[in-house]
Structure formats: C-alpha cells, structure tokens
Image (tube, helix red, strand yellow):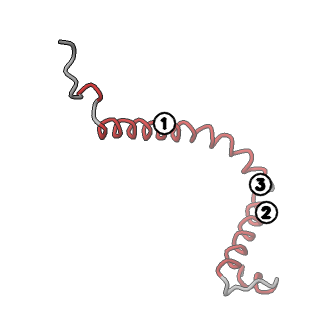
Amino acid sequence: MTLVLLHLYGFDIDDPRERQVGFLLASVGTYEASTGSSLVIDAARVEPEAIWNYAPRKAGKFLLQVLAAVAGLHLWKGSPSSGSSAGPP
C-alpha cells in the first residue's frame, strides 16, 4: 500500500533513495498516528538520556585506546633508561 501511495504522490518507486524516503515518511506518519505525539519531540526527549547512558562507555573505551597506544609507543621506542650510557665512574 505504501508503494502505491508513493507512486500516486509522484515518487519514483524504482529509485531506491526515493523509495527509502517514502518508507521513512510512512513510518513517521504511522508513529504519530499510533502515539498521538510528534516523533521529533519524542526523539528530543529521549536523546539526553541516551547520551547520559552511552557517553561514559564511549569515554572509557577512548581512554583505554589512548593508554594502549601510549604503551605500544613506549614499547616500540624502548625504555630510555636502557641506553648505553655507563653511569658515573
């Protein structure tokens, strides 16, 4: 039914991008009809909570990657104390 309505409203249903846009519009319309609220407002309400829950994991993963890169660089260059200087006589 969605494809028929897309064709009637002038969308080219043979073009995958236009078909995808049409399905997106249909899903947004269905969401708004079933919940009675706007998808954009609901997404804006959920976004801060998602960021609050997801950001610590992302930050921890980034910190672990930085520490691994520093450790790898340190091992690749070698320890500066293992040089060939012979210390005081």
**Is label 3 or label 1 in front?**
1
Label 1–label 2 contact, CB within 8 A: no
SS at badge 3: helix
Residue 2 position, x and y percent, is 72, 79
**Dot 1 alpha-carbon crowd within 10 angstroms: few under 14, some 14 to 19, many 20 or more:** few
Quadrant holding the C terminus = top left
Q: Residue 39: x and y, percent? A: 76, 56
Q: Are marks 3 and 1 in contact (CB under 8 Å)?
A: no
Q: Are discs 3 and 2 less than 8 Å apart at CB?
A: no
Above or below residue 81? Residue 68 is: below
Front position among marks 1 and 2: 1
The residue identified by callout 1 is 60
Q: CA distance from mark 1 to mark 2?
A: 40 Å
Is 49 left, or right, of 32 in this rendering? left
Q: Nearer the viewer, residue 89 or 66?
A: 89
Kindly identify the residue that appears in the image at 73 percent across and 61 percent down: 31
Q: Which of the 4 image quadrants contains residue 37?
A: bottom right
Residue sitting nearer the eye, 19 or 17: 17
Q: Secondary structure at mark 2?
A: helix
Q: Amino acid at mark 1?
A: Gly
Instruction: Look at the numbered disc 1 and give the secondary structure of its residue.
Output: helix
Choose mark 3 or mark 2, whichever is in front.
3
**Could you tell which of marks 1 and 2 lies nearer the N-terminus?**
2
In this figure, which residue is indicated by the disc labeled 2? 33
**Amino acid at the residue labelled 2:** Ala
Residue plotted at (80% across, 86% down)? 8
Q: Vertically, is 8 above or below 48?
A: below
Query: Which sits earlier in the primary sequence, circle 3 or circle 1?
Result: 3
Residue type at the position of mark 3: Val
Relative depth, front residue between 68 and 59: 68
Q: Nearer the viewer, residue 18 or 7?
A: 18
The disc label shown at residue 40, or none = 3
